[in-house]
C-alpha cells in the first residue's frame, strides 16, 4: 500500500520538534529513518502511530493500516509467548490461529511458545515484540530501533521478515542506527526537518500527563 506524509509538524510533550516532514513510501518499500540522537525519529514514529497528534500536516494513509513497534517491548509478563500473540490477534481482529502460528514461525519462537514473557531473555522478548507486527496483519510497519538486543542471526531473521512483508505489498519505516542488510531500502534523513528551537521553557514532565 502506498502512503505518504505531507508537511507534518510533530511535538513531544509541549516541544515542537519536527516541521515540514514530507515523504512518500511505495508498496513493497522500506524506508530507513536516520538522524542523530534527539533529532526526532521517535517523535515522528509516535506521531504516525497516533500517540501524539500532529500539530500540522497530513498522514495520508487509510485508518487502521499502521502498526507500531515502540522502543519498549510492551509485553504482558504473566502471559506465555503464544498467549501474548493471541491477545494481540484479538486486539487486531486477525485470524487468530493462522496469525499466531505465522508469527511464531517467522521469529523462531516455537520452543518458547509456552514460556511466560516475563521469563524471556532480552533478545527473546524483542523477537516476541516484533512477532506482534506479523499478528496485526497491518500493511504499514513503523518500528523504533527494532534490532536492539538481537544477535546477528536474529537481525538477519528480522530482515527476512521485513522482506517477506514487503513482498506481500507491505511497507516499513524503520528507525535504526545499524545496517539491517535490506539492499533495496531507501534512507530518510530526519535532520532537515528538526526544528532548532531556542531555549526550552516547557514543563519537562508534560509528557507524563498525555
Ligand atoms: N518525554 C519528552 N518530553 C519532552 N521532550 C522530549 C521527551 N522525550 C524526548 N524529548 C525531546 O524530543 C527531542 C526528540 O527526541 P526523539 O526521542 O524523538 O529523538 P530520536 O531521534 O529518536 O533520538 P535517539 O536516536 O536518541 O533515540 C529531543 O530533543 C528530546 O530531548
Image (cartoon, helix red, strand yellow):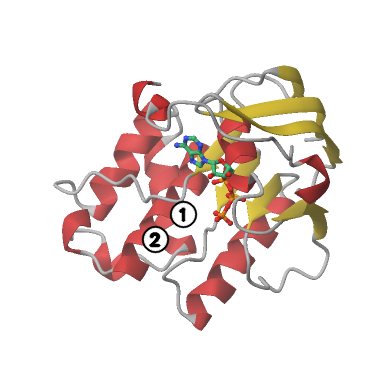
The residue under the point 26% across, 60% down is 113
- Figure quadrant of the N terminus: top right
Residue beneath the point at 69% across and 61% down: 163
Q: Is mark 1 on a helix, strand or loop?
A: helix
The local crowd at label 1, few if under 14, some if 14 to 19, many if 20 or more residues have their Cα within 10 Å, is many
- Where disc 2 sits, the SS reads helix
Report the number of discs.
Answer: 2
Residue 65, image x and y in percent?
A: 63, 29
Q: Which residue in the protein does label 1 denote?
A: 130
- Residue 74 is tagged as none
Left or right of 119, for residue 110: right
Indicate the quadrant containing the C terminus: top left, top right, bottom left or bottom right.
Answer: top left
In-front residue for pair 158/74:
74
Q: Residue at x 82, y 35 (%)?
A: 2
* Residue 116 visible, this orientation: no
Q: Does label 2 point to a residue whose CB lies under 8 Å from ligand 1? A: no
Where residue 156 sits, quadrant-wise, is bottom right
The residue carrying mark 2 is: 126
Ligand 1's quadrant is: top right
**Residue 184 % position (x, y):** 83, 64
Please indicate whether residue 160 sits to the left or right of residue 209 in the image.
right
Q: In which quarter of the image is residue 83?
A: top left
Q: Are marks 2 and 1 in contact (CB under 8 Å)?
A: yes
Crowding around mark 2 (Cα neighbors within 10 Å: few <14, some 14 to 19, many 20+) is: many
Residue 73 percent across, percent down from the top left:
36, 51
| Residue 208 pos. (x, y %) | 35, 28
> Is residue 136 visible in this depiction of the protein?
yes
Which one is nearer the viewer's eye here, 157 or 43?
Answer: 43
In front: 110, or 149? 149
Q: CA–CA distance between discs 2 and 1?
A: 6 Å
Q: In percent of the image, x 53 and y 28: which residue is there? A: 201
Name the residue nearer the viewer: 122 or 29: 122
Amino acid at each position: 500500500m502506498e502512503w505518504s506524509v505531507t508537511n507534518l509538524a510533530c511535538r513531544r510533550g509541549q516541544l515542537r520538534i519536527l516541521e515540514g516532514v514530507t515523504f512518500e513510501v511505495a508498496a513493497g518499500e522500506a524506508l530507513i529513518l536516520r538522524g542523530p540522537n534527539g533529532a526526532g525519529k521517535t517523535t515522528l514514529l509516535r506521531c504516525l502511530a497516533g500517540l501524539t497528534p500532529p500539530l500540522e500536516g497530513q498522514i495520508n494513509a487509510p485508518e487502521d493500516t499502521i502498526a507500531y513497534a515502540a522502543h519498549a517491548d510492551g509485553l504482558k509478563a504473566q502471559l506465555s509467548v503464544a498467549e501474548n500473540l493471541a491477545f494481540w490477534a484479538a486486539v487486531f481482529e486477525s485470524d487468530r490461529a493462522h496469525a499466531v502460528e505465522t508469527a511464531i514461525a517467522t521469529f523462531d519462537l516455537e520452543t518458547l511458545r509456552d514460556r511466560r514473557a516475563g521469563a524471556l531473555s532480552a533478545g527473546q522478548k524483542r523477537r516476541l515484540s516484533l512477532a506482534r507486527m506479523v499478528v496485526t496483519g497491518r500493511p504499514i510497519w513503523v518500528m523504533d530501533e527494532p534490532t536492539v538486543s538481537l544477535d546477528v542471526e536474529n537481525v538477519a531473521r528480522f530482515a527476512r521478515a521485513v522482506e517477506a512483508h514487503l513482498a506481500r505489498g507491505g511497507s516499513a519505516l524503520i528507525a535504526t542506527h545499524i545496517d539491517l542488510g535490506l539492499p533495496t531500502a531507501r534512507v530518510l534523513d530526519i535532520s532537515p526537518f528538526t526544528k532548532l528551537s531556542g531555549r526550552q521553557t516547557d514543563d519537562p514532565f508534560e509528557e507524563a500527563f498525555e
